[in-house]
Amino acid sequence: MSILKIDGVSKSYASHTALDNVSFDIPAGCIFGLLGPNGAGKTSLIRIITQITGADTGEIYFKGERLRPDHIKYIGYLPEERGLYKKMKVGEQLLYLAQLKGLSKQDATARIKAWIDRFEIREWLGKNIEDLSKGMQQKVQFIATVLHEPSLIILDEPFSGFDPINANLIKDEILSLRERGATIIFSTHRMESVEELCDNIALINHAHKVLDGPVKEIKDTYKTDTFQVIGNGHLLITSPDFKVLEQHENHGIFRANVKMLNGSRPNDLLRYLIERVEVHSFVELVPSINDIFIQKVTETHHV
Amino acid sequence: MSKIWLIIQREYLTRVRKKSFIIMTLLTPVLLAAFMIIPAWLATMSDSAETVMILDESGLFAGKLEGKDDLKLIPLSGSLEQAKEVYRQTDNTALLYIPSISIDAPKGIKVYSKKNTSLQTKIRLENMLEKEVENQRLIASGLDREVLKNMKADISVASVNLSDEGEKDNNAFVTSGAGIMGAFVIYFFIFLYGVQIMRGVIEEKTSRIVEVIISSVKPFQLMMGKIIGIAAVGLTQFLLWVILSFVVVTGVQSAFGIEAAPTPAQQIAAGQAASGDDEVAGETATQEKNGASQVMTDTFNALGNLNIPLIIGCFLFYFLGGYLLYGSLFGAIGAAVDNETDTQQFMFPITIPLIISFIMSYTVILKNPDGPVAFWMSIIPFTSPIIMMVRVPFGVPAWQLLLSMAMLILGFVFTTWLAGRIYRVGILMYGKKINYKELSKWLFYRV
């Protein structure tokens, strides 16, 4: 079941088109990567989902219902541009933001207590935001995003401002949120940063959706049956079933990318190699999302 | 609605708890009280007594001049040179030299002093001598003082309003004062708190929290919450000022047993009373004092005859109406710019009608509160909060008042709509230099 269905959404501003007939589904309980270069239309789409702006045409369905203003309490949003009230105390700020999402004061207070214990930040509660370090501010902002236990969490460029330690902390929190049933949308132009985390992705370029689906399926579609072999000896492939795309040799150690042809299997190649050289490493070359994106974008350009 | 309420609460509480708010609120009445009380206090503090030596060669004033607590007189005898020598040996203020003169030609009187004689001392001496010479001339001409006193006339014209409701005393001074006071407070309030709205919006924009907030509430709710919250802050401050000023002034007065600074008229009268040495001066002073108390009575009568509930009602209406009208525009400016230095070009057209109406209020409007300029300016919503406030104490026909109020409400609805359109686009727009053309486009954006 999809938590969010984006159906033919278009949005244009005075000078340019931000989204052109974009449609895809976001399955519930997954980590979804909304990927694309800067200016592709990711933030425009997010602002439509969070109801900051409206779509020109097209519809968005949240859990099968047309998006309504009261759905915002099920959505948590961490914008790319982070910010909190500088002169407001951490505790009051969290309470205020949670109440704006529709939480009662009691519920909000209880949840804030749970989160500050979890992040061990009890002593910050009475401090003003401006007195905290950047990393601390980010933790507070993350708590503010998820405090109302949204079923859909949208993180725009989530790791751009976090230092590595906080980034890992946030990653762990995101994974545990998914385990508790939340759906997470990552929006980023740094595709490699979320590749390992995402279950599903949608690629957006120049206001158009280029590609979407489960990461594994996409990779399967785009894999080229190429394997990288590293070993000792002199590699010379003469079989018509394999084709060497690239080969380097250094101090008797070779490194070669070999493509399967005529329906041959990896084991066929291994067997062939073992008879001739000493194999140290044998891995399938899987295209990264980045590669797929570039391939797809150049493809569409040619068309 | 509950979300607007949350926003109002935050805007109100964060401002009211600020140190600057508390200090401003507490300090202003103290300063105000100080302005009223210190001059009065200084006036009651008598200067150190002065001592003037007198060498009277004419013998006209012998035994006639009497010293006072703060002006001691020491008669001398002998020649001028001797007297000067005696004076030099002392710390006395001055030496008054009266050559042998007749009452008909009292000339050649001199004051010698080590330092320059103060004007006040000189005037007091002159008055003293004048009174005595007049007195002696009167006696010489055979006139009785009593007769002269009875001949003095004191006339003041009381103005009375002839209206349908009957006759009413009025007092142009009090009426104008009430109007200008109200107009000034409104002017001051719009500026002070309008700019606070603008700063608040800029703060939300630059701290980038605005995107988080408007993913929870509508931009319009955020804007209105801020405007209403700050209005509540302003009303709180205003109310506290009124109460605290009252408490401080009465408290200090009862503690020190002094009255607020006397009016210039009273000061002059008091000065004359102090300078006068004989009965005439005393009488004049009493008359002046009576005059002063007459002014007070008139003032209270006039105040009583003003339609106080109407004035207060109008004040609250125009106070809030004017603030809301301009407040939303200030909010729109805050949304359109990235920082406070960029606000100048947009502030200008907003401040101009305010400043013009304030200047007009005590130039043109006071002179002719029912003229065509006054009429039109009190109907146009951008100037009406200030101009109508000046006119109300003079009496305004009900239809004009209702029209003006209706126009103000319409104007407020219009500026709020306008500001809302600019606001919703502006708060998410960064790093773009905005001009009026750009702003006008925002009005018709579909968001």
Image (tube, grey):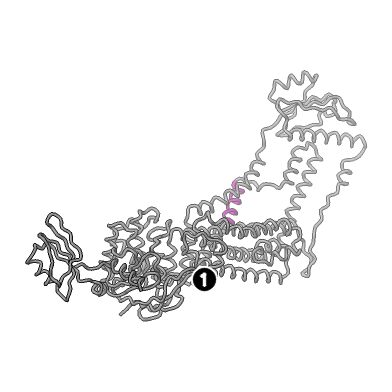
Q: Nearer the viewer, residue B438 or B202?
A: B438
| Residue at which label 1 appears | B445
Nearer the observer, B387 or B417? B417
Tell me which chain the residue with mark 1 is part of: B
Q: Is residue B283 positioned above or below A87 on the image?
A: above
A181 sits to left or right of B41:
left
Residue at left 72%, top 58%? B176
Residue, x 55% and y 68% (percent of image)?
Answer: B441
Q: Which residues are magenta?
A: B241-255
Query: In which quadrant of the rendered image does the C terminus of chain A lie?
Result: bottom left
Q: Quadrant of residue B372?
A: bottom right
Give the x, y percent position of residue A134.
35, 55
**Residue pictured at 61% horizontal, 60% vertical:** B350
- Magenta span includes B242: yes
Displayed quadrant of residue A269: bottom left
Direction from residue A241 to residue A166 in the image, left or right: right
The secondary element bearing badge 1 is classed as: loop
How far across and down, in percent of the image, does residue B38 sit? 62, 44
Lateral position of residue B49 relative to residue B415, left or right: right
Label 1 sits on what residue type? Tyr
Residue A34 in view: no
Question: Dot 1 surroundings within 10 Å: few (below 14), some, or many (20 or more)?
Answer: few
The picture places residue B237, in percent across and down from the top left corner, at: 55, 57
Q: Residue at x 45, y 78 (%)?
A: A57
Q: Name the outermost residue toward the left.
A: A275
